[in-house]
């Protein structure tokens, strides 16, 4: 197996009642996907557990097998979206041994994820008010993995020397801002064009 | 007068009851500064007009000379913070004829503004839920000015050719993310170190 040049995975905190069967896991994911749509469109305050179970097509009692409160499903949704986006990027960058190639593929994968999950921004931004710990974990987990990847790439001579911490936050900021332009400000620029323009800046910015 | 290489000013929409005297303007600014502290610490829902006038040291009736509702003072606060940050950047970059020097000075000015206004992120992010139009105006005004500056710099041969729109959002994203690392995630890295590391990426990323 080739070593990935992508975003490193970082351990997560406990996730409540994790299901033991594949079917249970599918139900839990269906509830989280419904929470994503319902909280994304109504906002946290106006969303109810009834809305979420109705959207998921499960009985209200089923919700309580996996989550105990609306607060808990929201926190888990924020962390799950973080895991999903990091997983997508890790998958997309796995084939690349060179960090610069991985940066391009990772940015493209991130923007595609954002387009498929247009409520991501609204949900994560609302976490700053509803669950600041989940907000912090979302970004700091991402930043820690990014930084680890940059340090490894610098050691391998794939990128120039530089402050990996500031670079990680700067590169995350580029991706986050371009994703927000795409889905919150509804830009109609095709993702490949965005990636090409941004990657040109990134590649020249950090290449050896 | 030298031409500024900084962020261009873009016309604003109407701002409600604008005071006609310097004293009136000072009172209006005091109310907005109080709203910044109160809404920044309590959040929009828990902040009241009474809290704001008490923090500002003015009578409640005085509030209504300038604003009619809490919604209105919040919207005006978001737009005022946008004007203030663009003004700071324009001031800081005015002396530079070269866009790259202006980028560095602008990033430094932005991070200093953020450090002096630690509630900026919380307030602007809350606008996505409380007043999406103000949120949109805040970022789109910023992006439009940034883009105009990049197009002029490209025409003057000060930066390489590239998609000014995507570059504007990418560079805004860098500044926004580093500012958030500083005040929301409470990094203790000194601003000059952040600027040096980020500017190295930016300078190499867009220089001719």
Image (cartoon, coloured by chain):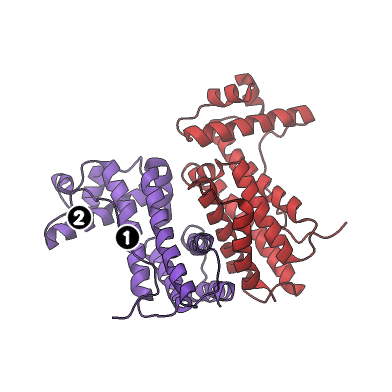
Chain colours: A purple, B red
Which dot marks residue B86? none
Q: Where does the image place residue A188, in percent across and percent down from the top left?
A: 51, 68
Q: Where does the image place residue B68, in percent across and percent down from the top left?
A: 59, 29
Q: Which residue is mark 1?
A: A83
- In the rendered image, the quadrant that contains the C terminus of chain B is bottom right
Q: Nearer the viewer, residue B13 or B158?
A: B158
The residue located at (60%, 39%) in the rendering is B77
Circle 1 — which element?
helix
The residue located at (36%, 40%) in the rendering is A45
The residue located at (41%, 49%) in the rendering is A136
The CA span between labels 1 and 2 is 15 Å
Placement of A3 over or under A164, stated as above or below:
below
Which chain letter goes with mark 2? Answer: A
Earlier residue among tags 1 and 2: 2
The reply to whether dot 1 and dot 2 touch (C-beta < 8 Å) is no
Q: Residues within 10 Å of mark 2 (few under 14, many from 20)?
A: many
Name the residue furthest right.
Answer: B1
The residue located at (18%, 47%) in the rendering is A63
Quadrant of the rendered structure where residue A161 is? bottom right
Q: Where does the image place residue B103, in percent across and percent down from the top left?
A: 68, 61
Quadrant of the rendered structure where residue A6 is? bottom left
Whether labels 1 and 2 belong to a single chain: the reply is: yes
Q: Is residue B84 left or right of residue A136?
A: right
Q: Where does the image place residue B205, in percent across and percent down from the top left?
A: 61, 72
Q: Nearer the viewer, residue B120 or A189?
A: B120
Quadrant of the rendered structure where residue A206 is? bottom right
Q: Which residue is mark 2?
A: A28
Count all numbered tags in the image, as a single digit. 2
Q: In the image, which is nearer the foreground, mark 1 or mark 2?
A: 1
Placement of A131 over or under B23, stated as above or below:
below
Name the residue furthest front.
Answer: A155
Which chain letter goes with mark 1? Answer: A
């Amino acid at each position: 197996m080739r070593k990935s040049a992508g975003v490193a995975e970082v351990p997560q905190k406990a996730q409540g009642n994790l299901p033991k069967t594949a079917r249970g896991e599918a139900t839990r994911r269906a509830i989280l996907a419904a929470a994503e749509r319902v909280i994304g469109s109504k906002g946290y305050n106006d969303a109810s557990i009834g809305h979420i179970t109705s959207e998921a097509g499960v009985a209200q009692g089923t919700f309580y097998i996996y989550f105990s409160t609306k607060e808990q499903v929201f926190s888990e949704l924020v962390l799950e979206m973080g895991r999903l986006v990091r997983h997508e990027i890790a998958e997309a960058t796995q084939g690349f041994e060179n960090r610069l190639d991985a940066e391009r593929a990772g940015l493209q994968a991130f923007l595609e994820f954002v387009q498929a999950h247009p409520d991501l921004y609204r949900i994560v931004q609302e976490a700053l008010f509803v669950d600041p710990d989940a907000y912090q974990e979302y970004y700091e987990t991402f930043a820690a993995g990014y930084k680890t990847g940059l340090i490894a790439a610098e050691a391998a001579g794939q990128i120039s020397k530089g402050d990996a911490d500031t670079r990680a936050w700067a590169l995350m900021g580029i991706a986050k801002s371009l994703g927000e332009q795409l889905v919150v400000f509804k830009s109609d620029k095709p993702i490949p064009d965005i990636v090409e323009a941004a990657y040109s800046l990134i590649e020249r910015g950090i290449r050896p």
